[in-house]
Image (cartoon, coloured by chain):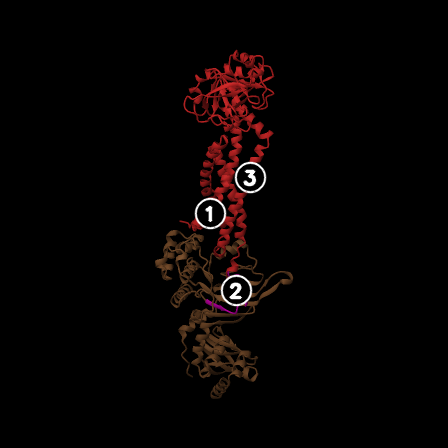
Chain colours: A red, B brown
Amino acid sequence: MRVPLAWKNLTHDWRKLALALAGVAFAVMLMFQQRGFNHALFDSTVELVRRLDADILVFNRARFALTSELRFPYEMLERLESQPEVASAIPLYLENKLATAHRDGLPARPIRVIGIDLKKAGFEDATGALAAQEAVLQRPDTALLDRLSKQYYGFDLSPLQGEVQTGELAGRKLNIAGLFTLGRDFAHEGNLVMSSDNFRKYFGYRSAEPLSVVDLGLVKLKPSVSAKEVVSELQSRLPSGVMLMTKQAFIEREIGFWARSTPIGIIFAIGAAIGFAVGVIICYQILATDIADHYREFATLMAMGYQGGYFMRIVLQQAWLLAIFGYIPGLLLSWLLFQFNSKWTGLLMNLSWDRALLILVLTLVMCSLSALLAIRKLFAADPASLF
Amino acid sequence: MATIEAPFGDLDHLIRKWLPSPEELSIAIRDLNHFYGDGDARKQVLFNNQLEVRAGEIVIMTGPSGSGKTTLLTLIGTLRRVQEGSLRILGTELLGLDPHELIELRKKIGFIFQAHNLFESLTATQNVRMATELLGIPTGTAEPRIESILKRLGLGHRLHYKPKSLSGGQKQRVAIARGIVHEPRLILADEPTAALDAESGREVVTIFKELAEQQGCTIIIVTHDNRILDVADRIVNMVDGRIKSNVLVQKTAILCQILQQYPLFKDLTPSVLASVADKMSLRRFADGTDIVQQGEVGTDFYVIAQGVVEVSSSGKVLSHLGAGQFFGEVSLLTEQPRNANVRAVGDVACFLLNKEDFQAVVSASESFEQQLRRVLFDRQ
């Protein structure tokens, strides 16, 4: 059995090791936080779309993002429904800029209102609260409130079962009969969901017939029809003013808008890069100190005939051990922080496997870079100085 | 004519040791110079050094600090590049050697540094294993060897202790074990016994001796510890970058012993005897060789170590001389040409003292001169 020198040196002094791992874990956490916020922005923005049960989405070609309020005529959906490939085409109505809600005595704040007929269209939140309260939504002047909405509307976000809160939406009395879960994003501080019948009463200003202009069309295809294959065919049968996209393509387009048209993605990328750089410096310090502490021993190994490759291996092994054992507490800590952040900001902080894996790879690269920097110190050791 | 009984057992051994063939040389240094620094700051630290060390020899190097002995040691140990002159170790010329081959050569060398330089994180056994692992010695062979060496060094009960739990002497012994476990052909040791008590120091020396005698391992020890001087075959003293004296201790001791039995040297004080012995060289002559030819200018004084010579003058045999007897002195004392011919009868070995050294010894020692004159008188 070979002497596991890297492991032995690293674990010899547990206090030094703990400090080293704390340093690496800190860097890991920084990267996780930055990436986490970055993803939270995109995830939260498209969460509504992800929750919709649709194969193809229809929208006004000029609608560059969900937040823009460009709509298309309802009859487009009727035309779509008459196509042989289509099973159903259901409208979804959105209002945000002009929809303001508040409780009595508090200032009115903008809120996103989603008008949808849950009987026809598939829309379900993560907790299954919508299907359960579908009957409630049939009552007049009634809506469900997103429990992740901001506190400042004045609504109780954890009301008793069956309790109805009253407030105002767009200058009209509103009953909040229950909660669902969707999440805030950078453009929306809260969400309401209501039936299209109710929606029509509140937002008469949209048009002479408020429901004749649609924000998003949810198209379900007949079984065995592939959305990818049929989308351009359907597109060709409609005027160019409306656009059709598969759900996945729409999600990517939406994220792409936020990534390219706002500096937010870059800001978080810089944040993650800083976390990476901090990690390189911390890890370099640890490795360089270890080399300096063992200068005479390493020089002795050189005198014995050990060569560069061996030392490279030793330092890289140490770096990777630091990376892996620093990553684990970093991951746990990040997960806790994600929970906390999610609660605090209402953003969706998802810690998925692929994202965790990316940070692990980044951590390994980070520590390897440090090893390459630190190894120069080792190669400067001169065995002739030992005599 | 009575010949004197010399301790021939020792002598045979000595002759072998003294006249090594080139392939028996472990270290051969010729015209070795070394410099530190560059340009104007360039400073010479080794000056034209010559040294030959036979395989299996134990060399003790002494000299004040700054004398260049450390530099010489690092050059021999391949830890520095040879700049000028020739340095062969274990049959390989180091001047201009490829760096990778230089490092490969290190595996045949055992280093014992003044500081133990052990990894604090490794146990005694693991520290020693670093040496066997490098050479790819299989665990089955290496482990028992490591254990037995550590046991011999009195560390049998400390095999799996880390340096923190060992005393200074124990740590040094682990370092020694690491330096010798791979059975190197050359060991370079810097004050190996300085941190040890008399008993462990003795044990280390005994191990060195065994390695030298049984495996032909050459050992160079830089030390000021006079307790271990007796182990040395050769003592090299350096001053100001030059090898000031290079003495084969055993040769001197045996020669003194031999010389003392001869009437000529009987009454010399030990120090004069040693200085004569130091300066003597040994040479062999094949059967029938003319060692001295009548009429030529005398350059050496000869003491017969082995064999018989025939002294003749103008073709007429005058006498036969045997071990312990000497010839060649008259010409040196009188500065006259050789007055007789001396021919080897069978193989002959002689100790030679050159003219200058002979005259210096003669003039330094009145008793020697008197002794010599009396012997010469008696002979006539």
**Tag 3 subunit:** A
Marks 1 and 3, how far apart in space?
22 Å
Q: Residue at x 52, y 47 (%)?
A: A284
Residue found farthest to the front: A105
Q: Which mark is residue B70?
A: 2
- In the displayed structure image, the side of residue A1 where residue A222 appears, left or right: right
Residue found farthest to the right: B40
- Amino acid type shown at disc 2: Thr
**Tag 1 subunit:** A
- Amino acid type shown at disc 3: Ala
Graded by Cα atoms within 10 Å as few (under 14), some (14 to 19) or many (20 or more), the crowding at tag 3 reads: some
Which stretch is magenta? B58-78
> Is residue A89 shown to the viewer in this render?
no
Position in image of residue B54 (x %, y %): 47, 66
Residue A105: in magenta span: no
- Foreground residue, B116 or A272? A272
The mark lying in front, picked from 1 and 3, is 1
Position in image of residue A160 (x %, y %): 41, 24
Q: Which mark is residue A19?
A: 1
Disc 1 secondary structure class: helix
Marks 2 and 1, how far apart in space?
40 Å
Disc 2 secondary structure class: helix
**Do the residues bearing badges 2 and 3 touch, measured as CB atoms within 8 Å?**
no
Quadrant of the rendered structure where residue B161 is? bottom left
